[in-house]
């Protein structure tokens, strides 16, 4: 059985390579077609002086826009200090106000908690806007996937990422902010909200600055087999974790799950196509961790080799279900899965 | 399907002079409190290192039930190794059942 499993994995990898080759061939053919099209078009219009002048003007304006944009970018970085490294992590979780609610609109409480670098971000109400109102373009948590089933979120009921400072630690140079808001959505909503921006405090070795963050949350108001709204699991881990150099440590992720009998698992956060949404921004495994770091049974096995270095661990806590496995299989995977099934059928027939 | 993102920081530090962790005392298990009645509880911490060289520098609250207020870290006037924080909270009707408070203490 174990050998079978290994072979299975091997097949999976080979097919993935094939598929990539196939895709890149398609891209090459398309590129050729496009090139030909534009080349002939260009040749046809080459003689027209009018066109040439127009083109020159367009290039000039484009260049000007580019300069203006880059100047604005420079100035914004200069004026709003908050664009500098200031994020220390956090989480977004939600709970149904009444999981047994049978009505067509469901109210949930969305709880956002974030850690920030102090004194870059000050301890006030309306964090982080109270520190630098202009550096964030939109204050709302945006829908980033499955927005057609957002239960009316984008059209009427948006919530923002503004939180209030609840605790401050001067010795550790950080503040924690939190806010809980109620959100009413239609029954059966299923979509991803996210708080995405930059920048994390300086992380990793060698040092990486201005890494972006992405904290997604799946709002799933589809009813459980027992007819209730499933409350997602919550994970608790203190941040920051201080670990002694050259000493292996185990950092357990404490999970709280209100639904009995759920199989709760931890895994590293990933980026699309492996998962539907960007779960980790600039702090994805394995680049975000020192070599040799592993995650097993919701415990992080970690060893740091350089004093003074900070790392950001990004992971997902989720129920393991067959549906959830299928949901994560997008494009490539579905193709590979079908191939695997037909292979198995072929073997069985023979 | 539900999925929760957890993102936290890990800081690599040099070997401390005293690696012994401080302890919370003696508040273990469960405290019974009454709905709509304000409570005030002192949460004590003991520094197990030499208080002349190593101190408890801060206590971070990693999880709290909404409405809980915790004072800043205070040092006992009689015992150099003893610290405390004061929790004030009025339990609400929708908080019936078990509620939690998690804290992490740091020495330096």
Image (spheres, rainbow, N blue to C red):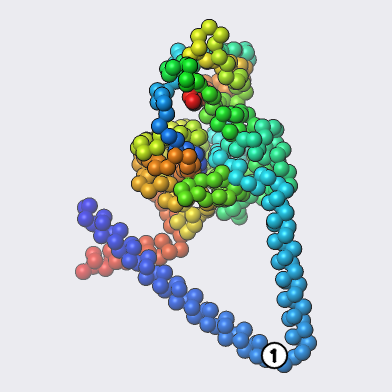
Residue named by callout 1 = A46
**Seen in the image, is A281 located left or right of residue A251?**
right
Residue extending farthest front: B52
Residue A115 position in % (x across, y down): 58, 36
**Seen in the image, is A256 located left or right of residue A68?**
left
Would residue A9 be seen by someone viewing this image from the given angle?
Answer: yes
Name the residue nearer the viewer: A132 or B98. A132
Residue A48 position in % (x across, y down): 75, 91
| Residue at 60% from the left image edge and 12% from the top image edge | B39
Neighbour class for label 1 at 10 Å: few (<14), some, many (≥20)? few
| Residue at 57% from the left image edge and 86% from the top image edge | A36
Does A217 sit above or below residue A97? Answer: below
Quadrant hosting residue A221:
top right
Does B55 sit above or below residue A101? Answer: above
Quadrant in which the C terminus of chain A appears: bottom left
| Residue at 72% from the left image edge and 93% from the top image edge | A47
Residue extending farthest top: B78
Chain letter behind tag 1: A
Give the SS element for disc 1.
Answer: loop
Residue A23 position in % (x across, y down): 45, 72
**Seen in the image, is A48 located left or right of residue A164?**
right
Residue B49 position in % (x across, y down): 43, 18
| Residue at 57% from the left image edge and 54% from the top image edge | A145
Name the residue nearer the viewer: A349 or B8. B8
């Amino acid at each position: 059985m174990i050998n079978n499993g290994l072979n299975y994995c091997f097949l999976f990898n080979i097919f993935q390579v094939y598929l990539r080759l196939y895709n890149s061939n398609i891209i090459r053919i398309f590129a050729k077609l496009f090139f030909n099209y534009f080349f002939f078009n260009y040749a046809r219009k080459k003689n027209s002086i009018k066109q040439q002048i127009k083109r020159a003007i367009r290039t000039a304006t484009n260049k000007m826009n580019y300069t203006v944009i880059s100047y604005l970018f420079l100035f914004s970085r200069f004026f709003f200090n908050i664009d500098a490294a200031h994020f220390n992590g956090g989480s977004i979780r939600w709970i149904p106000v009444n999981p047994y609610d049978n009505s067509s609109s469901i109210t949930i409480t969305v709880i956002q908690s974030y850690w920030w670098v102090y004194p870059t971000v000050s301890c006030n109400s309306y964090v982080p806007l109270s520190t630098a109102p202009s550096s964030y373009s939109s204050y709302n948590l945006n829908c980033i996937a499955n927005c057609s089933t957002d239960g009316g979120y984008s059209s009427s009921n948006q919530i923002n990422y503004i939180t209030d400072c609840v605790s401050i630690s001067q010795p550790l140079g950080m503040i924690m902010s939190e806010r809980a808001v109620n959100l009413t959505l239609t029954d059966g909503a299923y979509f991803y909200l996210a708080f995405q921006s930059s920048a994390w405090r300086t992380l990793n070795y060698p040092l990486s600055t201005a890494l972006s963050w992405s904290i997604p949350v799946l709002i799933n108001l589809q009813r459980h087999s027992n007819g209730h709204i499933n409350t997602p699991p919550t994970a608790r881990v203190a941040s920051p974790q201080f670990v002694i150099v050259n000493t292996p440590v185990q950092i357990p992720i404490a999970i709280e799950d209100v639904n009995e009998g759920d199989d709760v698992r931890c895994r590293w956060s990933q980026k699309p196509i492996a998962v539907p949404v960007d779960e980790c921004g600039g702090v994805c495994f394995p680049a975000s961790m020192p070599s040799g770091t592993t995650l097993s049974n919701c415990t992080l096995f970690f060893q740091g080799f350089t004093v003074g270095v900070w790392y950001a661990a990004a992971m997902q806590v989720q129920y393991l279900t067959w549906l959830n496995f299928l949901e994560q299989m997008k494009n490539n995977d579905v193709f590979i899965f079908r191939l695997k099934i037909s292979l198995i059928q072929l073997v069985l027939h023979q | 399907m539900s999925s929760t993102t957890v993102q936290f920081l890990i800081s690599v530090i040099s070997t401390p002079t005293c690696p012994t962790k401080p302890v919370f005392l003696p508040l273990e298990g469960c405290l019974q409190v009454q709905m709509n009645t304000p409570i005030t509880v002192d949460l004590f911490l003991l520094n197990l290192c030499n208080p002349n060289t190593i101190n408890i520098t801060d206590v971070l609250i990693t999880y709290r039930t909404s409405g809980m207020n915790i004072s800043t870290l205070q040092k006992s006037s009689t015992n150099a190794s003893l610290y405390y924080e004061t929790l004030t909270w009025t339990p609400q009707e929708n908080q019936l059942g078990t509620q939690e408070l998690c804290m992490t203490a740091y020495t330096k």
